[in-house]
Amino acid sequence: MKKILLLAFAVALVSCNQTNIAYINVEDLMKDYEGTKALEETLKGKQEIMAKELDSISAPFQQKVQEYYKNAQKMSAAKRAETEQALQQENQMLQAKQQQASQSLQQENQTLSEAITKKVDSFVADYAKAKGLHLVLGTSGNGTVMYGDDKLNITNEILEVLNKDFSK
């Protein structure tokens, strides 16, 4: 008899504490979020600016290389060696600038992406509390959520509100 009462109590307790669950397709959310699109545009613009700057530096170098090959036959061995060494140093400097620019862009991308992720996470937490959700799962591709009823998918709701917030 005690076991039946305990079982009935457990069933009643579980039914009283229904957990509200929803999930978000993180891939779709980040792809369609205006903040992510703005980040991509910003980084694309900066990448183009850096590429133009590097091109403006490398064009004179390429011209020096062509001039060297054109005049190499006429140069003494010592002059050729000196010119080659100078060109190698300049090439190394150019490569270092390219690497520095690439690292700078990657760092900025990482920093801005982390800021977007924190904003989205914070927003989802606030949204879940306001809607009375107890658990919000994130899925991406064929990952974490193996199946979810479409009624539980709040990706579009979150995306709509996030994009409205971003446009402000």
Image: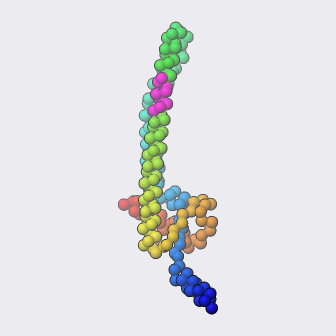
Outermost residue, bottom side: 1
Res. 135 visible in picture: yes
- Residue 119 image-quadrant placement: bottom left
* Residue that appears at 54% across and 63% down: 138
Confirm whether the magenta stretch covers residue 18: no
In the depicted view, which residue is nearer to us: 3 or 70?
A: 3
Instruction: Point out the stretch of residues depicted in magenta.
Output: 89-97
Q: Residue 134, percent across and down?
A: 49, 72
Residue 49 against residue 13 in the figure, above or below: above
* Residue that appears at 45% across and 53% down: 114
Q: Residue 42, percent across and down?
A: 43, 47
Q: Quadrant of the N terminus?
A: bottom right
Residue 28 against residue 85 in the figure, above or below: below
- Residue 153 image-quadrant placement: bottom right
| Magenta part, dominant SS | helix
Residue 118 against residue 79 in the figure, above or below: below
* Residue that appears at 42% across and 68% down: 126
Residue 15 against residue 80 in the figure, above or below: below
* Residue that appears at 46% across and 57% down: 117
